[in-house]
Image (cartoon, helix red, strand yellow):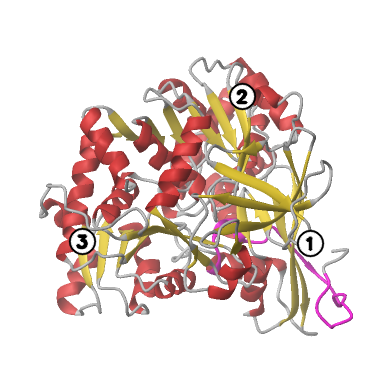
Amino acid sequence: MKQVKEKFRCFIVENFMFGSDNNSFHDDDSFLEKGIIDSTGVLELVSFVEDEFGIDVKDDELVPDNFDSINNLAEYINTKSNVNG
Amino acid sequence: MQVQEFLERSAERFPDKAALIAGSRRFTFSDIDAQGNRLANFLSGCGIGDGDRVVVLLDNCPETVISIFGVLKADSVFVVINPSVKADKLAYMINNCRAAALITHSSKWSTALKAAIDSPSLKTVLVAGDTDAILEREDGGGFPFEAHGWDEALGGSKVVTPGSKAIDIDLAALIYTSGTTGHPKGVMLTHLNIVSASTSITAYLENRADDIILNTLPLSFDYGLYQILMAAQFGGTVVLERSFTYPYAVIELLKREKVTGFPIVPTMAAILLQMKELKKERFEHLRYITNTAAALPASHINGLRKIFEGARIYSMYGLTECKRVSYLPPEELDRRPTSVGRGMPNEQVYLVDGDGRMIDEPGVDGELVVRGANVMKGYWELPEETERMLRPGRYPWEKVLYTGDIFRKDEEGFLYFVSRRDDIIKSRGEKVSPKEVENVIYELPDVIEAAVVGVPDEILGESIKAFIVLKRDSELTDKDIISHCMKRLEDFMVPKVVEFKEALDKTSSGKISKKGL
């Protein structure tokens, strides 16, 4: 899980973290609330999830519960990986 | 008729009807009206009124809606600003209109404070959200303005409807729009402008009190703003979302709240059409979809029709300077899918040639001119810019709007967009001034030359590309450039791609030429 969280943190800092007032964010911070990722940025995040983790993101899985924080993302990856065995 | 009377009349007719649904928060018409009154009385108590400008820096949320009506009830002018704006631009706009008050949220406090400190006109700052840490300083350090918490300010104010001294030709709103010069311009709209436009639009959309509109568009954008104003006028419900970030959640909302009207821009259509399983959904309640801000490609129209069977699709065109110009009746969509229709009710539109003569023949390109009560009064304190756009009309007292867009008509007078006169880019349906982005890039000392252009993009319509010439030994990377832009510009203005070049072509007069970029 820790490795997965690190991967996401790196991806987000690399691609999105320039405009925020504070460069640090917690694993449980909402990207939407903090303005870390904007509306078209989420699509890039989906591509990253699909390419990096080989996961097929279904329409109804693209929801804040799965994508709106480092913790949520890690949980989502974990669940999908377990399901796939 | 003043704009806040839309709300006041609906509150009389349907006091307990849902006016606004935002996540788990639900407000009736009388709720919004009462809160609006409290805000208005609070503002008056601070000495604000009589045409004072009040800047609103908030995400799409109930407080934004309450602020719009509260400011109007206080005989003041609302200025809703894009919530992702950065401190410098915010300070520019506050100072430009010499705003007397700023309404914002604790989550935007650091941006707001930086701008507010540099804005001597501000008397009052009202902050929603978690204000404990912010307001403590007030007693200690002291701000040059008075800072108040939203709950405490409204809670301590009277709920009685304030008396109004304003009339319909008084200013109601300033909407800042990007300009080619690099600085935003404040479009001045009176109550009459807004009431006229709202009445025309709700007429051709055939809005009824049982309409439920889902709005994900920013309220700083006139397209989003008017969803609130029009719904107040016809007594309908607005389901308000902050953005279209999670399209599946929006689809669920469309179904759950039995939405009847869905305003979109092409970027949203592109994102929806990428969803793999949308074809299985049913949206029986959806009566209409509207599109404006950029052209909806025929493939998108067909895609939307398959998903939203039975919904009428309205292709429209407009500009902030007159709110809306035209709409295509849905039944014409098959015959003329690329047209944006004809003028809306109570308005005249026509094409003129280079000499200002009206063009009657079909198929001839000309500049689109708009005549009607929906046309703005001008740009705030920019007489030259205003004179370029607003020119004498048919009668000595009137001004008509030269849109700066080139169109042609067919035999039946239906309009087809040809091109813009200026180099404004449309990305995600939002205007982006290349000069504004270039100015920001030039702030980096290593940049010798910069040219910003729009590049066709399937999702964004146009994406932003910057061509840059750097000093010889510079180590700046494309990420550095983008990072700098993100700190200074709203998100939709940030270049997606940066390309470094050895040199940029020049015109014969020595200016950078964007041809071939």
- Which residue is the site of mark 3? B43
- Which residue is the site of mark 2? A84
Q: Main secondary structure of the magenta part?
A: loop
- The image quarter containing residue B396 is bottom right
- Amino acid type, mark 1: Gly
Protein chain holding label 3 = B
- The image quarter containing residue B256 is top left
Q: Residues within 10 Å of mark 2 (few under 14, many from 20)?
A: few
Residue B161, percent from left and from top: 16, 47
- Amino acid type, mark 2: Asn
Work out whether disc 3 and disc 1 sit on a shared chain. yes
Q: Is residue B403 left or right of residue B30?
A: right
Between discs 3 and 1, the one toward the N terminus: 3
Distance from label 3 to label 1 (Cα)? 48 Å
Q: Describe the element under mark 1 as helix, strand or loop.
A: loop
Q: Answer whether residue B505 is magenta in the image.
A: yes
Tell me: residue B233, above or below residue B395. above
Residue B13, percent from left and from top: 24, 29
- Which residue is the site of mark 1? B354
**What is the magenta range?**
B488-513
Residue depth check, mark 3 versus mark 1: number of the one nearer the observer: 1
Residue B249, percent from left and from top: 48, 31
